Amino acid sequence: MKLYFKLIGMHFKSQMQHRTSFITLTVGQALMTVSAVMSVLILMSQSQNNTEFTIMEMLLAGSIVNATFSLAECFFRGFDLFPRLLGNGQYERMLLRPKNILIQILGSTMEFSRLGRTFVALVILIFVLLQVPIQHGWMILLMILSGIVLFGSLFIIYGACSFYTTDSLEVFNIFTDGGRQFGQIPFNLYGKNILVFATFVIPYACFQYYPLLVILGKSVSTIYMLAPLASFIFIIPAMLIWQQGMRHYQSTGS
């Protein structure tokens, strides 16, 4: 982990060398989040009476998802860009180093401009918490942490797929960017089938919808309270897929 923190510092100093570009990108990322939130407000204000959630409660769900995705995208960016590491031979050079390969990939790329999204999401989150009474406030931290783990695991699976395709699978963005976009409102609003998928296949709802019911006082279920732990279980298949991909990989020299 000492190496990882050194890599974080290195990337941060590097990006600070071009501050104007960094600030511009960060502001752009922040405006993207503002745009997404505004679109949700406009759309849901027309149908609020047909849902069990108020606008503020929907903003709470969306802000948590935006914060988790932006943090995962910042610190797991190396897996998102992993096809490049395979294409330019950087991955093979990493294998020769006596360091953990996952740490090296995590530290290969970090885009701190993504924290612009995080900033906006946290501002909205704090604003909503001042307006909406909640219970078990500590669960918000658990929701954010488990969301980071889930999206990070998806980025790892995305990287593992590159062992087979040697190129990026844009269709996989359905599960990463698509998960963020769908998560702007509680997953139950999309219907039963989507909720089942977001519970038992890719557990978005386990860190967003179910604990949301608990902190808003709409449920007292212990299972819902522990639902975010499903994201940590999701690491297991993600790592198995990654290990299988590494076994499948053949270097250009073999």
Image (cartoon, rainbow, N blue to C red):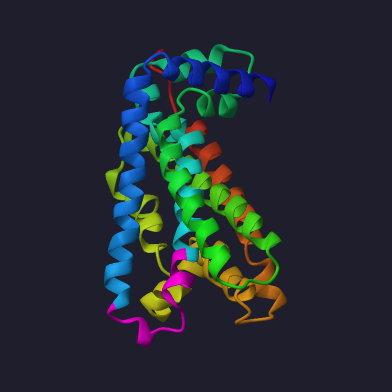
Residue 108 x %, y %: 48, 22
Which image quarter: residue 182? bottom left
Q: Is residue 186 visible?
A: no
Question: Residue sitting at 57 percent across and 44 percent down?
Answer: 240
Which image quarter: residue 141? bottom right
Question: Residue sitting at 40 percent across and 23 percent down?
Answer: 85
User: Is 113 inside the magenta-drawn segment?
Assistant: no
User: Is 5 or 31 nearer to us in this picture?
Assistant: 31
Q: Is residue 17 visible?
A: yes
Q: Measured along the vertical axis of the image, is residue 9 above or below residue 196? A: above
In the image, which residues are magenta?
A: 46-59
Question: Residue sitting at 34 percent across and 40 percent down?
Answer: 29
Residue 73 x %, y %: 45, 40
Residue 133 x %, y %: 61, 73
User: Is 58 inside the magenta-drawn segment?
Assistant: yes
Question: Residue sitting at 49 percent across and 71 percent down?
Answer: 57
Q: Is residue 184 left or right of residue 228?
A: left
